[in-house]
Every structure is written in structure tokens, then in C-alpha cells.
Amino acid sequence: MPNSCKPSLIVHGGAWAIPDEAVAAVHAGCRRALEAGREILERGGAAMDAVEAAIIVLEDDPTFDAGTGSHLNRDGRVQLDAIVMDGSTLEAGAVAAVERVRNPIRLARKVMESCEHMMLVGAGAEQFAAEQGLPLCQPEELIHEREKKAWGKCMGGNHLSEFHFSHQHGTVGAVARDAQGRIVAGTSTGGTCCKRPGRVGDSPLIGCGCYADAEAGGVSCTGWGEAIMKVVLAKSAADFLRSGQMASQAAQAAVELLARRTKGTGGLILLDRDGIPGFAFSTPHMAYGYVAPDGSIVTAV
Ligand code: GLY
């Protein structure tokens, strides 16, 4: 591993049909997340800390479908999934279907660092959170008024209608490479609107919604989980990197694989092993941003 590398950071706020009225909030959220992660990397901090900090900003921002403000399931409750993966060791920690954890990415990291298992779900994950000293919130604290209204419309007969499509929004993720060359990727989501209680999508599954391997790069995905799982999208993108494709080509090849083999839509961000960013999406928009080589922040939808 090199003695000192230039740090890199890329984030996303989901691949979705971002309406005009959400564009400013999406840019602002991605910018704040990048600022939080960049500050850590610039002072020589760890990629793991940068990814966690960036994702916490996005989880706390109700603009995105992660943490507070996530979509409600059929029962009118928020159920959250998250994962973090360390490309140096291939260690990962994941949680799914948690209802009382404000920042599931923080719990995923605790699972990675302090648990004998790689993934915990539901009540068991919340019990572990309490044991680790993470505060538990009331489930209602994660519910945003906008989502309550959307849920009411969906359950009132508009489920899967045009309304539902334009309403579906953003899983979040981040990939960082620090000055020691360590690559870490993370993903966090509230999943799909009106999902069945207990439904788990791609996001917290290693290789599906997230993958990191220092020999290839790090990847975080967004989109329709039931399709993404079929092509193990994050690992597929990492394999394209491993085969020698450039970052942007690997991202595009992975999204094309998703479309060709599943007809599913989605997107992803990645860093190759040298920290070069890449991104691609097949949805109308994807919210994303990265720290440019001169240290400035670029965001786009
Ligand atoms: N990609 C997020 C989900 O399907 O849950």
C-alpha cells in the first residue's frame, strides 16, 4: 500500500425521478455530506470515518430515503437497512429492518467492528445497538409528514401509479479512499415505498448494494433492489474494475448489465483502487457528487 495517497470521496443520494422542486435540496444535501467527509480526509482521517460521516448527513436529511424521512412500509412504519465495507480487509457490517435506529450506518459499523456476525436484523440488531451504547429512538421520530401523505395516497389506491413512480426516491451511499490508500464503501436506505414489512432490498447485502476491495475499488448502488440483487451489482462493478476497465466504463458496464439482464433501473457510484471516481445511472436522474482533484466539490442530478 502506498505511504501517502491523494484522498478521494464520492457520494450519492439515490437514482430516481428527481422532481424540479427537490433539486436544490438534493444538491445541498450531497454538498453537506461531501463537506463532512472531506474535512475528515483532509486532516488525514480514515476512509471509514469519512464514509460514516457523509452518510450520517444524508440519513439525517429528510430529502433522501435513508434514516429520517424514509418511505413508509405497508404498516406505515420506517424500516431501515445499511452496510459498510472495508476494502483493505474485506470486512463488512450490515443491519436490516431496524425501526429504532436514527443512523443505521453507525450501527452497521458497530456490527463490523464489534460483532462476531456480519449482519443483524430487526429486534436483534436493535438489541445489539443498545448493548453498544447507541441511543434508540422512537419509531415515530423517523417519520416525515411528506411521507405520511405519500403513504396515504399509495395505500388509498395510487400504489404503483404515476404518482408512486415520481415519489420514489433516494437510497444514499458514499465511497472514500484515504491518504493511506484504504477504500471503504457504505450504503443506507429506507427501501421502497409501501414495501412489505420485513422486505430487505439490495442495499445491506454485501456485493449487491455495496462492495469494496482495495485490489479493485469501492462501489455503492441505488435503484430497484429486486433487480440489483439478481446481478450482484456492486460486485459486478468491482469485477469490471478488476478486469482493467476505467472507472467511468466500469460504472456504465454495470448499469448496462442491470438493464440487459433484469430490465431494472438504477445507478451506482464508485472509486477505482487509485481513487478515480465513476458513476452511471439508467433512471431519469441520480443525485451524486464528488470531491474534485483540486479539492472543490462537484454535485449533480
Ligand atoms: N435500493 C434500495 C432498495 O431497493 O431497497
Image (cartoon, grey):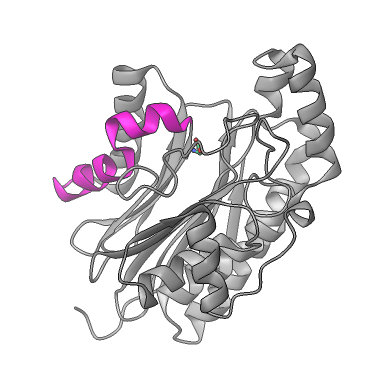
Q: Compared to 99, does 233 lie above or below?
A: above
Q: Residue at x 67, y 45 (%)?
A: 78
**Viewer-side residue, 289 vs 149:** 149
Which of 130/221 is in front?
Answer: 130
Magenta stretch: residue 33 in it? no
Side of 202 relative to 54 (left or right) = left
Image point (71%, 28%), residue name: 167
238 horizontally vs 106: left or right:
left
| Location of residue 68 by image quarter | bottom right
Q: How many marks?
A: 0
Q: Quadrant of residue 101?
A: bottom right
Residue 105 appears at what percent x and percent y? Answer: 52, 63
Camera sees residue 291: no
Residue 91 visible in this rendered orientation of the protein: yes
Asked if 105 appears above or below 72 in the picture, the reply is below
Instruction: Name the quarter where the N terminus is drawn.
Output: bottom left
**Magenta stretch in the rendered image:** 224-245
Residue 216 pos. (x, y %) = 21, 56
Viewport quadrant of the C terminus: top right
The image quadrant that residue 256 belongs to is: top left
Magenta portion: prevailing SS class: helix
Percent of width and height locating residue 265 = 46, 25
Residue 227 covered by magenta stretch:
yes
Q: Nearer the viewer, residue 136 or 13?
A: 136
Please tell me whether residue 268 is drawn above or below residue 194 in the rendered image. below
